[in-house]
Image (cartoon, grey):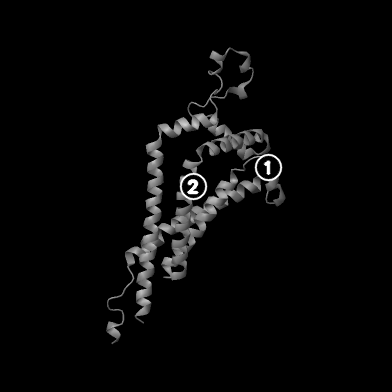
Amino acid sequence: MSGNHYKGHEVSCCIKYFIFGFNILFWLLGMALVGIGLWAWSEKGVLSNISSITDLGGLDPVWLFMVVGGVMFILGFAGCIGALRENTFLLKFFSVFLGIIFFLELTTGVLAFVFKDWIKDQLNLFINNNIRAYRDDIDLQNLIDFTQEYEDVINTQCGYDVRAKPDSEQKDSINVKGCVPQFEKWLQDNLTLVAGIFIGVALLQIFGICLAQNLVSDIEAVQASW
């Protein structure tokens, strides 16, 4: 009787350790991003004065590290520990959380296509607000400077004395097209690459959900045979 205790029901080691290995990397990367965010806030004195977070005039780029790192940490923890300990609650949480993220990404893509004109106006407003706050946050300065130094985005000495030149000569020193039109052009030129990245991420998420659900089914089948 004891020899047939698990007969026909076993947990797939390949799926279990694949989920574990993938998510431990995800978990560590999430911790690294959160750590970088906390370090950046510490350097700016935000951690010693939490209320200063809301005093910034524009977007603090550190929030990107904190939010993305936090989501990766939670997902990685649930997937890693859930697979290692064969914990169905954590694995189901991992699947549901990943499914919610996938649904939000899909919804965001559809809404962005439907309301593209409104989003363009909001993006212009967002960029203008952050440019006004250029001197308020060193991380925002670095982000804007990095963007301006990328390939054909020209901005020599913040456009000093450029407008005194004829219109035909201004484009040699500053970008006269604006950020949003240039971003739209880049998006059109690289549409295949962008679409490929989004499809790849979506397939990876679906693959992760299927693997986690498969592992949950194996674990529950083994538990039911006890």
Q: Does 182 sit left or right of 215 as displayed?
A: right
Residue reaching furthest to the bottom: 1
- Residue 134 at x, y percent in the picture: 65, 34
Q: Can see residue 204?
A: yes
Instruction: Please indicate whether residue 53 sits to the left or right of residue 34 in the image.
Output: right
> Gap between marks 2 and 1, in whole Å?
26 Å
Is 153 placed above or below 82 here? above
Near-viewer residue (57 or 119): 119
> Disc number at residue 56?
1
Q: Is residue 87 visible?
A: no
Q: Position of residue 189 (x, y in %)?
A: 41, 31
Looking at the image, tell me whether mark 2 or mark 1 is earlier in sequence order.
1
Q: Badges 2 and 1: C-beta atoms under 8 Å apart?
A: no
Q: Which label is found at residue 108?
A: 2
Residue sitting nearer the eye, 163 or 34: 163
Q: Amino acid at mark 1?
A: Leu
